[in-house]
Amino acid sequence: MNECLFCRIAGGDIPAETVYENAQVLAFRDISPQAKSHVLIIPKQHLEGLNDLAGAKDDMLADLLRAAHEVAKVLQIDQTGYRLVSNCGKDAKQSVLHLHFHMLGGEALSERMV
């Protein structure tokens, strides 16, 4: 998956501001933030999106959700609230075909979805 932007970030080929990392998950700041705090949480294993979960191990999927909780604590938004969103497919405006979650917070968010 050398062409995949997020695989290249996870592999260290492209720099990113890491917020959290473990063996299976990487979280880094979005370069075009849509909120005061905007972090992308990705599996290091390439999966195209939520419709590609058949190829994923359950422990990695659990790590993604646990990572979201850890990222919220690192960003100090775990008590005030945050939004966790995954766009899936072209109609949802998924711009990078690698499973990822947007964590948004640090301010009062609008009711509009990202």
Image (cartoon, grey):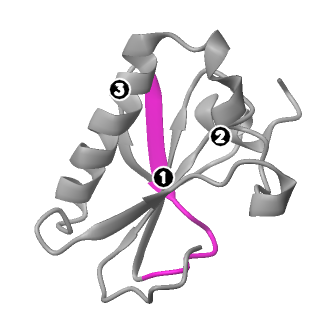
Which of discs 3 and 1 lies nearer the camera? The answer is: 3
Which residue is at 30% across, 86% downward? 107
Horizontally, residue 18 falls left or right of residue 63, namely right
Q: To which residue does mark 1 refer?
A: 28
**Mark 1 residue type:** Phe
Mark 1 and mark 2 in contact? Answer it, CB < 8 Å. Answer: yes
Return the disc, 2 or 3, that comes first in the chain's sequence: 2
**Mark 3 residue type:** Asp
Query: For numbered disc 2, what is the local secondary structure?
Result: helix
Q: To which residue does mark 3 refer?
A: 63
> Residue 55 versus residue 96: which sits nearer the camera?
55
Distance between the alpha carbons at the discs numbered 2 and 3 = 18 Å
Q: Position of residue 16 (x, y in %)?
A: 56, 52
Query: Is residue 100 one of those drawn in magenta?
Result: no
Distance between the alpha carbons at the discs numbered 3 and 1 = 15 Å
10 Å crowding of disc 2: few (<14), some (14-19), many (20+): some
Q: Position of residue 57 (x, y in %)?
A: 50, 10
Horizontally, residue 24 falls left or right of residue 20, namely right
Vertical placement of residue 106 versus 108, above or below = above
Can see residue 22? no
Q: To which residue does mark 2 refer?
A: 9
Q: Position of residue 62 (x, y in %)?
A: 35, 24
Q: Quadrant of residue 112?
A: bottom right
Which residue is at 25% across, 57% downward? 72
Return the disc, 1 or 2, that comes first in the chain's sequence: 2
